[in-house]
Amino acid sequence: MGLFDFLKKKELEEIKNLKLKLERYKSISDIEQEVESQKKNLDQLISLKNSDIKNLEAEFNALNSNYQGALETYKNLRKEVSVFESKLDLIEFGIYEPIYDFEKSDDYREEQNKIIQIQKEMITADTAAICNTNWTVEGSEAKGRVIVKVYKKLMLRAFNGECDVLISKVKWNNVNQMKERMQKLFDAINKLGQGFQVYLNYQYLDLKKKELILEYEYQAKRQQEKEEMRAIQEELREEEKAKREFEQAQREAEKEEAAYQKALDKARKEFEASTGEKHEKLQAQIEKLEQELREAQEKKERALSMAQQTKRGHIYIISNIGSFGENVYKIGMTRRLEPIDRVKELGDASVPFQFDIHAMIYSDEARTLENDLHKAFTNKKVNMLNYRKEFFNVTLDEIEQKVKEIGLEAEFSKLPEAMEYRETLAILEKLNSQVKPKTVDELIEEEFPSSLKL
């Protein structure tokens, strides 16, 4: 083989190897092209999706904006409507805060009459409604003034009439609502007067609001005075009952004293004339009569002392878990000779169960002690408006601790007996656990089983 042939063969082998290599890398080249193609497609899809997302976000923002606007409109409309509803939403309008602080209800009425007099003076002075435009009718300013005066009169009549209705209906749960309605009324009438440029005076509105407030506070003060009068009458009735008890106890003690004294005198005479065994029996009888006489005298003195010392009495701590639940205690005072009688009266038909006594504390300054205990738990009253309701949401340990701080020793019964309440629970539990009565169909099925039916 010549050199030429050798080189030619070598070239053919190299060409063959190159072809093999080309075949080997051909698939790799195709993949890279495919990847590049898929990447371009993916980029186009991502761009398209991003565009869709932006469109959706724009739509969402627009919807959210519309929703917020609609919600705000709804709230405003709801507030507008609620002003004219019969029930008051305390969260929306707030709890009423008193403005005036007169001592007697007559003072509120007197101040209200002053406010009404100022309103009349504004009407007389033509300042209750104002018009700053000089109108002419058929070229006449005088006719224009007449028309404006008539229009003012109509506006004031409408406003005053509606305000009188609002004032007559004001009460504890709508006083703030009535003020809002009065403001809405004022704005509505002034809007009607825009055509003639006639307006109700804001000072006149303020006077009407003051009249409304004074009417409410007058009614509230009247109610408070009635409650105070009831408390005084209740206290007088209690005093009268206590007085009758003292007098009755004193009469009975005096009768017993006289009887024992008479029996004692008789026994002493017989004793002087007796001897032996009879003498010893009479001696024992005399000692017994002397002891009974001393007890009757002490009873009479106690009744007389209680009647004369009007500050003396008993503080009672009672509960009624069946009626009011746990940790609700009544702290009251009675001057009755038998204080338990007062507790029994409290458990009358007005409550379903009897009260349980946790402590009965005697004091020479009973009223002062009662007031001290009430002040100590004033923030825990069950009824924050009526001070006559002497119920407090406290624990018995807190009351006992306060009594010790005052310097008094008292025995407390921690566990309420609540016999009627506990027996009632037991009966209800028994009734609920009983087997449910069978129906008529079930009884028929027992008597005539399905297997025996035709």
Image (cartoon, grey):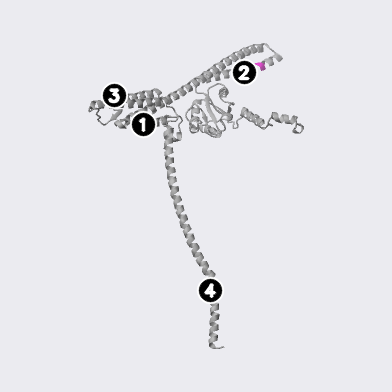
Q: In this figure, which residue is indicated by the disc labeled 4?
A: 22
Mark 2 or mark 4, which is nearer to you? 4
Q: In this figure, which residue is indicated by the disc labeled 2?
A: 292
Q: Which residue range is magenta in the image?
A: 283-293
Three-letter code for the amino acid on which mark 4 is drawn: Leu
Q: In this figure, which residue is indicated by the disc labeled 1?
A: 188
In primary-sequence order, the first of circles 2 and 1 is 1
Q: Residues within 10 Å of mark 1 (few under 14, many from 20)?
A: few
Q: Report whether residue 365 is seen.
A: no
For the N terminus, the quadrant is bottom right
- Nearer-the-camera pick, 229 or 334: 229
Q: Secondary structure at mark 2?
A: helix
User: 294 above or below 53?
Assistant: above
Three-letter code for the amino acid on which mark 2 is drawn: Glu
Q: Is residue 188 magenta?
A: no
CA gap, disc 2 to disc 1? 87 Å
> Is 251 displayed left or right of 220 in the figure?
right
Q: In percent of the image, x 51 and y 69: which residue is there?
A: 29
Q: In this figure, which residue is indicated by the disc labeled 3?
A: 124
CA gap, disc 2 to disc 4? 140 Å
Mark 2 or mark 3, which is nearer to you? 3
Q: In percent of the image, x 69 and y 14: which residue is there?
A: 279
